[in-house]
Each structure stands twice: as C-alpha cells, then as structure tokens.
Image: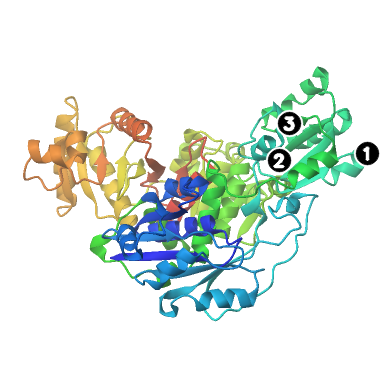
Amino acid sequence: MSETLLLVPLCKRVAMTSISLGLIHGIQRRGISVNVTKLIDRVQQNPGRGLRILSRVADSAQAFVVDEETLIPEQLTALAPHKDHVSLVVGLPATATAPHPYNIKLAQQGGAKLILLADSHADLQQLETAIGQLPGASIKGVVINQKPLTQSAPGADVLWATNANPTKSRETLKLTVPTLATLPWSNRALAPRTCDLAHHLGALPLNSGDWQQRRISAITVAEQSIVDEIAHLSPGTLVIIPAHRSDLILTACLAAKNGLLLAGLLLTGQHQPEPAIMALCEGAFDDGLPMLFIEAGVSEIKTQLASLSLHLEADDHQRQDWIMHEIAELLPIDDLIAPIDAADYKQSPEAFRYQLAQRAQQQPCRILFPEGENPRIIGAAAEAARRQLAQCLLLGDPHHIRRQAHNLGISLSSQIHIIAPDALRERYVLPMLALRQHKGLEEVMVREQLQDNNALAAMMLVRNEADGIVSGAQSTTLETLRPALQLVRTAPTQSLVSSAFLMLLADHALIYGDCAINPSPNAEQLAQIALQCAASARMLGMAPRLAMIATPHTHAKVVEAIALIRTKAATLAIEGPIAYDMAIIESLARAKAPGTPIAGQANVFVFPDLNTGYSTLQTIQRSAQQQTIGPITQGLAKPVNDLARDASVDDIVQMIILTVLQASY
C-alpha cells in the first residue's frame, strides 16, 4: 500500500501537531509505517518544535521548504510516499482568514486524501468558503478542535483560580463535509508542567522536586486564614503564597505530605523562608513537592501568566503520549486509509500493544489487586477501567483508597470495585483450612496468614470471585507468588511454575523464559518451561519458533530437554542446542548453521538457567533500550502475575492486559 494524507488547516487554533500525533499513532498501531513531511514556509525556514515532536514518533520525518518558484508536480514527486508506508504531509498554518494558498495549490493537484482542520469558534461562512476552494472528491472530512475560547489568546487564563470555567465551545459546527472527529475540551491536554511555568516566570526553584512530571490544572492565591485556604487545596493546583506566611506554607506542605498531589508552591516577596521553615518542609520535598520563589507581586505574576504558552513542548513526552493516545481513539483511522495486505503488516510495538488491548476489551474479566491502596495501582485501575480493559477489584480500606484517588485527581468509575478485606477474612478461614490441612495448619495459623492480602486474594481467586491477580507494586516476588503456589496451585497438566518476558522490537515480538523463577531447572523442567513459553506465544497471537539456548556446561541438559519436547509436541518448531547470537542473527545463522529453519528466525528463547536468561535479558534491555513487558507467570491454574517494584502505571496496565488474556485463553 502507498497513500498520502494532507492536513489542511482552514483557520487558526486547530491543534495541528496534536492531531498529527493522533494520526501517526492510530496508523502505526495498525501495523503501517508513517513518514511525515512538515511543510515549512521559505521565509521562515525553521521546522520548529512541531517537527521535533513528530520526529519522536514517526518512522521518519523531514521538513520540506515550500518554494513558490518550483512547479507543484515536482514538489509532489518529492513528497511521494514510499512503498508500504503512509505519507502524512502536515500543511502550512492558515492565514488569518483562509487556508494557506500553497495548501490549496497542493490539494488541487490531486493524489492526496485531504483531512481538514477547523476550530469550533471559527466563522462558519469563512470555513465554507475555504472548503469551496478544495477538490471535494479528495476531502475525507474535517477534524474540529473544541479548545475553549479564553480572554487570553495563549489560553493561560483558563488555569487561573481553582475550578476555572472557560468559555464553552460552540456545541456543534455543521459543515458541508463529514466530521471525522471532534476533539473535546480537556484540561489535562492543556496543563503545563510546573517546570514550564517556572522557566516562563524565571522563578528560583527552592526545591525542584517532580516539577517535570507535575502539571498545573489550576492556580490559586493563598492569603487568608488556614481554614479558608484548605478548601482551595486540590490536586494539580499551583498555590501562590506570600513568602512571609509560614503558616500557609506549612499547611500546604502538610497536605502534600498526606498525599495531596499539588502542582507546587510559588512563594512571592522580597525574602525567602527561614531555614527553620524549610527544614519543616523536608517531608513534602521528599515526596516531590516543587517549591518556587519569585520577587514579584501577584498582579505582576498574573500579567506574566497571560503570556504563558500552553502549546506542546518538544521535551514534554508525557503530555505528547497522552494526547497521541486520546486523539488516536477519536479518529476513524480505518476510514482514512486502505486495508493493509498481510504481507505488508509491520508488528511494531505500538501495533502489538494495540492488538493485545483490543483482544482484552473483548474478554470481560475481573482482575484483583491485593495492593489496592497503592497510588500506582489506583491509577492503573482507573486507566484500565476507562479503556474498558477489565473490571478492577481493589482490596483495601475504602476510605483510604477514595482519599488517595482524590489526592491524585483520579475519578473511580463503576468498573472499579473497592473491597474492604477485613470484612472478608473470616469467611475464607474454613475453605483455606481445607486446602492447607494436609500441611498441618490450624485455624489460628490460617487466620494469621489471611491477614496478608496476597493470601486473601489467592483464596478469592480459588473460589472464582476473580479471574486473575496482579500484585507486586510493593510486595516481594515471594510474598506475591507463595500464596499462589500454595492455594491456586499449578494447572492439572503442569508440575512447575515459570516466567516469561515479552520484548517488543521494531517489527516483531520475542518471548524470553525463564528469567525470573527457576534458578537451575533439570531437563524435564526445562522441557516444561519451553512448552509453557510456546503456549504463551500462542496466547499472544504468535506462531512459536523455539530456540533452546545452551552454554558449554548445559549442553547435555538441553539436548535431553529437546528430546522430551519432541515426544510431547512433535510439530513444534524448535532448534537447539544453540547459542543466543545464532538464534537471533539471521546472517550469522546462515553462515554457521545453514539449512536450519529456526536459527536466526526464533521468536521464543528458552534459557538453560535463570542466570543466563536474566543476564541476557538485562543486557539487551540496557544496551538496545527495547520495550519489555512482564514477567508473566506460567503454569498456574489461574493467572497471578508479579509486578516489578518500580512498575509505572503504564507497566501495570500492560500487565492487566496480559492477565486478562491469560484468564480468557
């Protein structure tokens, strides 16, 4: 396939870079490469931040300087898409009253599908006049930006004062061309980072903290009594405090220490706080609270904030990624590009993750979280519920979980169920006693073990009150898996539990096992691990091609394991004993092992021991910086997966998806 999409802004304020991000991501996750060409005015000749942002996600990106003296057909040749790629041409910004003349000329030459961009506040007649200048047959539709109209052109006033209510957008903008999508107002999409504001004001960071991650959704001035100001402290708020008001500074820091995710404190005045006051703030600083200082009054600060740009910054990857995913969900990608041939499909990390998420959405499962009070777990559960990936069950104190969610600015949907564990423990005493009585456990010991939420969750899983468990954000691997091994136990056909990591390369995925659980499996155990990894590959939609990795000391064991595998799965594609480099590098395999169908083509790597597997995985992760997901646990009767202690919210969401797929496989 080979197609060109041309973005044509009809007016100003159309969010062209954001829409470009959404288009790129939406196309890539369907397995298609995207080449971006950003048109640059000859006078300007500066691609700016827009190209830097798009270069980060596109398969390739270039600036193309528009030359009015060059014939359009010659320029079209330069913009022609490569084979098996979609070419996205980002047009020139509109003038004050109409599309850029060059965009119109380029569109009239044909050969590109036109995606029009409009602002919901634009003049309707002006937009229709602009549309009339474009070839109707090439127009796929219009994307409408509903960013609110504020008194300040850059939009900074929308942040001023807690719960600011910007002027509402026009509810509908009815044009004579189809509406592809309407981008709804989102405070999160516009929220700048605390560091962006600090750089804009030239404020001194008394404590930078998490200023590159924290975002400003509201700005409030604290000048009254402590009681009056507490009501204005909400997640995402930047609190402006006179530097001499130690009482208000300490109140805000105490709220932050108790879990309220403030954007930061901005202290104003002629003198910084006394060292004794700063020392009392250390607890909040340790939790990442930014504190800034500026020698300016509130009125002067407000004047400066009016010129604060809310545009996407080139280094703000977090905001770019959020906008990219949100807009990709809104755009009808399948209506914009032709279906791809199977031979042209590129299984990029984006495509692979999207494919897994789509499958998870079709399998309604209940995923249980023993660490339901953990902030990252709460954030991941909210994201999974929003994307309809699973029904999330949080074990923990309901009041504490709701307070944590409030402090983080997270809304808990109806797909998230909070379960108070203390009210449940007694009901599982006798069922657990029946499972563990052969080990000599008595009721008092069972009650003690059930105080551990991991054990309680395992019993809920055994009794079909959940479909899978995700834990480990703060528990050790032993604390997570021991109750699973004792209570959930292995599947009827399995005798051991193993692990597998999923590594996402540029155009395909790989599985590595066992890199986390079994230190030194014997031949029979190694054969079972290999078969479990092959089953995980099939669960993920992969046709398994196994490479049995061996070292000089494990060669005999691997030979024996391969013989056992072939007696149990005669049709399984398998190669070994083989060195890792020959298993993964096709040119090396052809030179040293010609005629072997798997060498150089393997997608499942089974290592002879944990040390070899883990060290290989870590080396690849650190040197090649590839995306990895996992480990997932294999061999249990029902899925129980262990997170890395430093797992991010996105990591946890990916583990939820894999757990859903395991539960429904």
The x, y position of residue 408, in whole percent, is 68, 46
Amino acid at circle 2: Ala
The x, y position of residue 505, in whole percent, is 32, 45
Can residue 409 be seen in the rendering of this structure? yes
Amino acid at circle 3: Met
User: Which badge, 1 or 2, comes first in the chain's sequence?
Assistant: 1
Amino acid at circle 1: Ser
From the image, which quarter does the C terminus lie in?
bottom left
* 285 and 607: which is toward the camera: 285
Q: With 467 as the anchor, is 218 left or right in this view?
A: right
Judging from the image, what secondary structure is the residue with disc 1 in?
A: loop
Q: Residue at the location (75% across, 60% down)?
A: 166
User: Which badge, 3 or 1, comes first in the chain's sequence?
Assistant: 1
> What is the distance, in whole Å, between disc 3 and disc 1 at their CAs?
20 Å
Mark 2 nearby-residue class (10 Å; few <14, some 14–19, many ≥20): many
**Residue where numbered disc 2 is placed:** 263
Of circles 3 and 1, the one toward us is 3
Q: Residue furthest front?
A: 69
> What is the distance, in whole Å, between disc 3 and disc 2 at their CAs?
9 Å
Judging from the image, what secondary structure is the residue with disc 2 in?
A: loop
* 193 and 73: which is toward the camera: 73
